[in-house]
Image (cartoon, coloured by chain):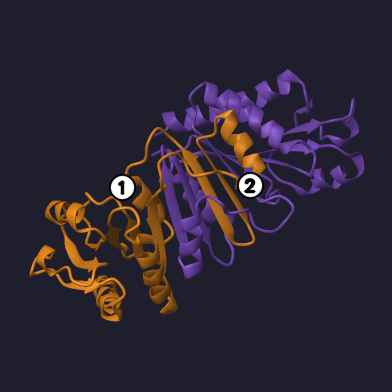
Chain colours: A purple, B orange
């Protein structure tokens, strides 16, 4: 198995991460690439669990995890005190994806795009993060923020999405060739 | 890592599988054993997916899976045309359980208990299945159905649950010792 390409989409709340990721997924899956997403549950707290009534019973009884499957849909629900991103990646990798796209976890080291909505708080973001492959900004002009050596695009620019898709697919193709 | 002990609880609908499994989980987890359950979604169809709104968006866009985590709860949702039980076991094994308890999948070869509610249809079940470690019956007397070499218990008999727990824990202890 070839290790998947791991890629991050980061930015503050309401910077459009989910929409951006959905566009990436749509384009990649159109070409039959297998994509898995990883994200923190928004707004804190735990994601709801209503997958299956019996699943909740198993969980209440003390099961560390339960898996329910029906007609091709599989839901695995697991609880422990905390999950490292590495554990989550390991679990996702089991499903043999070509790409794992991580929403958030901005401090991590994987190649990433940064979505910038507001000028003031975003300046800090660019200074702190590593391995930024492109910046997407919402305002009409955002040039003074962006390092000259990082490609930057207006959020709805077609060229921006293409740039990232080309980056991802070339990374993946290289990994497959090197196998 | 020591491979987990895989165990099945089978029986027709309304034979009490979920309750029986919950009792097993409660006793095992009380002693700090890690238990994961695997089951088919009841009544056909797909388990509901309302874990996270964004998760559905990723899925709609074509992601093969998405994973969302918050405060120690992790939900992995994946779709493909079908899932073999072997794939489900492999995924569960990643979480390093001591026991994987499978509800249903009666034709599979793992050690199992059979829960018997009705006399007529159940007779067939006992003839067809392999690797039966114990039989639990609902009626007051069910002896003529049960092979003389398979331990049988009334469903609420304390001794029955103890018997299975001892079986499971001794299997697990042996596996750990053999490491």
Q: Is residue A113 above or below residue A88?
A: above
Where disc 1 sits, the SS reads helix
Give the label on residue A39, or none.
Answer: 2
Q: Quadrant of residue A9?
A: top right
Q: Chain of mark 1?
A: B
Query: In the rendering, at what x and y percent does residue A153 appear?
Result: 78, 26
Instruction: Classify mark 2: residues with Cα within 10 Å, few (<14), some (14-19) or many (20+).
Output: many
Question: Up-down: is A120 above or below B39?
Answer: above
Residue that protrudes farthest toward the left in the picture: B148
Q: Residue at 43% of width from left, 31% of height from top? A: A176
* Residue B26 falls left or right of residue B126: right
The answer to which image quadrant residue A111 occupies is: top right
The image's mark for residue B144 is: none
Residue B58 percent across, percent down from the top left: 60, 35
Task: Provide the residue designation for mark 1.
Answer: B86
Q: Who's the residue at 71% across and 32% down the image? A: A19
A116 left or right of B27 in image: right
Helix, strand or loop status at disc 2: strand
Query: Is any part of residue A149 visible from this angle?
Result: no
Chain letter belonging to callout 2: A
Image quadrant holding the C terminus of chain A, namely: top left
């Amino acid at each position: 198995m070839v290790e998947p390409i791991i890629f991050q989409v980061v930015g503050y709340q309401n910077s459009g991460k989910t929409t951006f990721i959905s566009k990436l997924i749509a384009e990649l899956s159109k070409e039959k690439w297998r994509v898995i997403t990883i994200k923190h549950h928004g707004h804190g707290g735990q994601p709801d669990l209503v997958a299956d009534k019996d699943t909740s019973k198993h969980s209440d009884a003390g099961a560390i995890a339960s898996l329910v499957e029906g007609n091709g849909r599989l839901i695995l629900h697991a609880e422990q005190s905390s999950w490292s991103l590495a554990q989550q990646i390991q679990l996702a990798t089991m499903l043999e994806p070509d790409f794992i796209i991580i929403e958030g976890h901005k401090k991590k080291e994987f190649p990433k795009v940064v979505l910038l909505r507001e000028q003031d708080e975003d300046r800090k973001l660019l200074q702190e993060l590593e391995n930024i492959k492109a910046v997407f900004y919402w305002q009409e002009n955002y040039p003074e923020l962006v390092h000259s050596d990082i490609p930057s695009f207006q959020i709805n620019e077609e060229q921006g999405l293409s740039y990232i898709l080309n980056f991802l697919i070339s990374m993946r193709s290289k990994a497959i060739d090197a196998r």
